[in-house]
Amino acid sequence: MTEKRPVLVATEADDTTADMVITELNRRDVPVVRFNPADIGKDLTVSARFGACPASVVGQARTLSRTADLPRVRSVYWRRPEWPSFSHLSPDDSRFAAAQVRYGLGGTLYALDNLLWVNHPLRIAAADYKPAQLVLAQEVGFTVPPTLVTNDPVDAREFIRVQGDTIFKTLRWTPYRRDGVPMTGWAAPVTADEIDDSVRVTPHLFQARVDKVADLRVLIVGRHTFAVRIHSQLLDWRKDYSALTYTVEHLPDGVNKALHTYLDRLELVAGSFDLAVDREGDYWWLELNPNGQWGWLETETGLPMSAAFADLLTQGDRR
């Protein structure tokens, strides 16, 4: 009988996408231990020993309802975990405690070998830098819109005047509030007249606008590719999901191969890509989200995305 080694699923409390994958794992009778690093304390315990011969990690991760023997873990689905903030402690104590969790719990998990990460947190972090993404995209053969990253308002104005239609995009999505109101950063048009000295505060990303007829969200899971054409009249389709319609897309072999090569170069086993299609049918690179959302696309199209994740986590489809 095959040993039923558990899958660890690290994610926040309310994550319907992770729920879809866990449901598929349950159908395969694969044991799952779901946890959130923010629950460290009475709701989450980790205990590991080092220094044994041969070199290994011996220990457990325990939640209120499940226990995982760390040497037996077959894979880790690192979805959208939250790290604790320790708001009940003083600022200095909370920073100290948070660091101990990241380097204690995180470090113990990172020390595990012979298992599959989807995706490894350190690889996710390395893949999340948009300027580096743009360079790699060109290296694997994608057309990249002319892009400027700068905190020089003179350079920004000149770029916009030369490119014409230009958009501004955040370098990284970051939740924040303004006067108590939750804010987010959409891709938005920008003109040279809007650029003022406040640009000097931090680097900004300006990009020539692609004359697109549709967007593509492409999810790669192991060796599976799921491509969906997103139809809308929006510059940034994320602003209004009710305005979207979807069509399953078959990518040209060269585009599909380039996307897989891209993930291989970053040592990732899964990722969500955003591409644009212009009026000539050419594909333009926009960005990679190494831990992007996809659950609603399975609901809209019926593509077996969660099953592909469950297969990957169960079988350890290493690259």
Image (tube, rainbow, N blue to C red):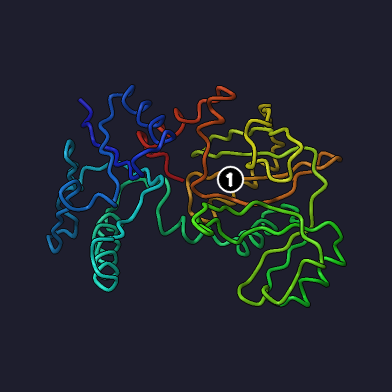
Image vertical order of residue 71 relative to residue 247, above or below? below
Q: Quadrant of the N terminus?
A: top left
Type of amino acid under label 1: His
Residue at the image position 52 percent from the left and 52 percent from the top: 182
Residue at the image position 38 percent from the left and 32 percent from the top: 19
Location of residue 22 in the rendering, given as x and y in whole percent from the top left corner? 35, 31
Location of residue 134 in the rendering, given as x and y in whole percent from the top left corner? 66, 60
Task: Give left or right: position of 181 versus 163.
Answer: left
Location of residue 117 in the rendering, given as x and y in whole percent from the top left corner? 38, 47
Q: Callout 1: few (<14), some (14-19), or many (20+) C-alpha neighbours within 10 Å?
A: many
Task: Give left or right: position of 90 versus 120.
Answer: left
Displayed quadrant of residue 63: top left
Judged from this view, the residue extending furthest toward the front is 179
Residue at the image position 31 percent from the left and 60 percent from the top: 85
Task: Give left or right: position of 223 versus 194.
Answer: left
Displayed quadrant of residue 131: bottom right
Q: Nearer the viewer, residue 31 or 202?
A: 202
Q: Nearer the viewer, residue 21 or 224?
A: 21
Q: Secondary structure at mark 1?
A: helix
How many numbered discs sit on the rendered protein? 1
Residue tagged by mark 1? 260
Task: Give left or right: position of 32 versus 287.
Answer: left
Image vertical order of residue 35 relative to residue 95, above or below? above
Q: Nearer the viewer, residue 51 or 96?
A: 96
Residue at the image position 33 percent from the left and 56 percent from the top: 83
Image vertical order of residue 272 relative to residue 109, above or below? above
Location of residue 17 in the rendering, given as x and y in whole percent from the top left corner? 44, 35
